[in-house]
Image (spheres, grey):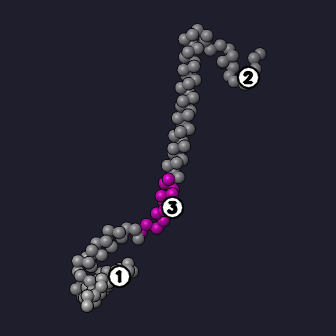
Amino acid sequence: MVKGRRRLTSQEKVAVLRRHLLDKVAVSELCEEHGIKPTVFYRWQKQFFENGARAFDRDRGGLEKHLEKKIAELHEKLARKNEVLSELLDENMFLKQRVRSGLGLGASFLRGPGQKQV
């Protein structure tokens, strides 16, 4: 009779690795006890150490949301600056055209918007 493949949960895999790392149980003994090959054990160990940094990432989703919000704010600020710059360039071009055409600025322009003529 052929024995099927036994699947260990992630908690069981960590427990096996912990016994090796903390209790100094030999890899061969653990492999015999759990019916796994040493290559499988070392693959688990490699995966464990490669993904270990995730254990220290507490609120990664919150950080990503914060960064996305900050990026959106910066995009809005940049868009507003572009609008202001565009308005200033338009006004500059208008004034240059008036000066070139000989109309000059005149007293009405110097008063500014909303001021009454005396």
Span of residues in magenta:
56-68
Residue under the image location 31 percent in, 71 percent down: 47
Q: Amino acid at mark 3?
A: Gly
Asked whether, in this view, residue 96 is left or right of residue 110, the answer is left
Badge 3 marks a residue whose secondary structure is helix
Label 3, residues with CA under 10 Å away: few <14, some 14-19, many ≥20: few
Q: Amino acid at mark 2?
A: Gln
Asked whether, in this view, residue 48 is left or right of residue 38, the answer is right
Q: Which residue is mark 3?
A: 62
Residue under the image location 30 percent in, 85 percent down: 4
Q: Earlier in the sequence, mark 3 or mark 1?
A: 1
Q: Nearer the viewer, residue 9 or 87?
A: 9
Q: Residue furthest front?
A: 1
User: Residue 65: where, in percent of width, then height?
Assistant: 51, 57
Q: Nearer the viewer, residue 88 or 44?
A: 44
Q: Amino acid at mark 1?
A: Leu
Q: How many marks?
A: 3
Quick check: can you spot residue 24? no
Q: Which residue is mark 1?
A: 8
